């Protein structure tokens, strides 16, 4: 089942000793409910350079989620609660391998919308980079 929804993304990236960086986006997108009970949220966004990205966030329960960004500098990573995963991110300077340690996945999505909350820490070469919180709100 696939329907058009309003997608509101709120993201906060923080590191001790620095001001948190916040990002907010409101756009339209698609919510798909798969046969296995997972939810897929798809939406497009444009970065400051004008490059278009398709974003896909998939969540199943409160234990696993994935985030993919397709475009000129794409990325994809998996979030597993209390587990560290490795992902590759494309940048203008080449590929970068990041560690993703997931702390919280709170999935309150239904076929009618809802919210998905992700909380995780990123590292590069086992060196701490930042803590992140992402809230996706899906409404009709």
Image: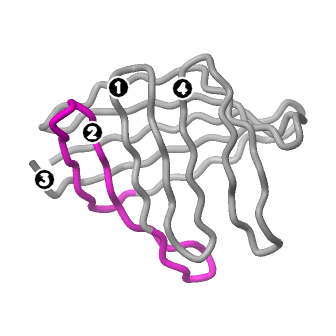
Mark closer to the chain start, 4 or 3: 3
Query: Which residue is the site of mark 1?
Result: 107
Q: Where residue 112 sits: x, y (%)?
A: 12, 37
Dot placed on the residue nearer the N-terminal end, 4 or 2: 2
Q: Mark 4 — residue?
A: 80
Circle 3 sits on which residue? 2
Q: At numbered mark 4, what does the secondary structure look like: helix, strand or loop?
A: strand
Camera-nearest label, 1 or 4: 4
Category of crowding for the residue at label 1, using alpha-carbon neighbours closer than 10 angstroms: few (below 14), some (14–19), many (at least 20)? many
Secondary structure type for disc 3: strand
Find the distance from the CA under tag 4 to the CA under tag 2: 16 Å
Provide residue 2's location: percent of width, then percent of height: 13, 53
CB of mark 1 within 8 Å of CB of mark 2?
A: yes
Asked if disc 3 and disc 2 are in contact, CB closer than 8 Å, the reply is no
Residue 11 vs residue 55: left or right? right
Instruction: Look at the image and give the residue range highlighted in magenta.
Output: 26-53
Q: Residues within 10 Å of mark 3 (few under 14, many from 20)?
A: few
Residue drawn at x 75%, y 45% as measured from the top left: 98
Pointer 4 with pointer 3, Cβ within 8 A: no
Above or below: residue 9 compared with residue 14? below
Q: Gap in Å between the C-alphas at discs 1 and 2?
A: 9 Å
Is most of the magenta stretch helix, strand or loop? strand
């Amino acid at each position: 089942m696939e329907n058009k929804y309003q997608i509101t993304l709120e993201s906060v990236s923080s590191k001790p000793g620095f001001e948190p960086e916040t990002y907010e986006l409101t756009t339209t997108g698609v919510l798909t409910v798969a046969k296995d009970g997972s939810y897929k949220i798809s939406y497009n966004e444009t970065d400051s350079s004008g490059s278009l990205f398709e974003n896909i966030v998939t969540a199943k329960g409160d234990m696993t989620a994935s985030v993919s960004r397709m475009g000129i500098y794409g990325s994809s990573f998996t979030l597993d609660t209390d587990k560290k995963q490795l992902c590759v991110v494309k940048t203008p300077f080449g590929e970068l391998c990041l560690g993703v340690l997931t702390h919280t996945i709170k999935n309150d999505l239904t076929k009618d919308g809802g919210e998905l909350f992700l909380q995780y820490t990123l590292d590069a070469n086992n060196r701490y980079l930042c803590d992140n919180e992402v809230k996706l709100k899906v409404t009709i």
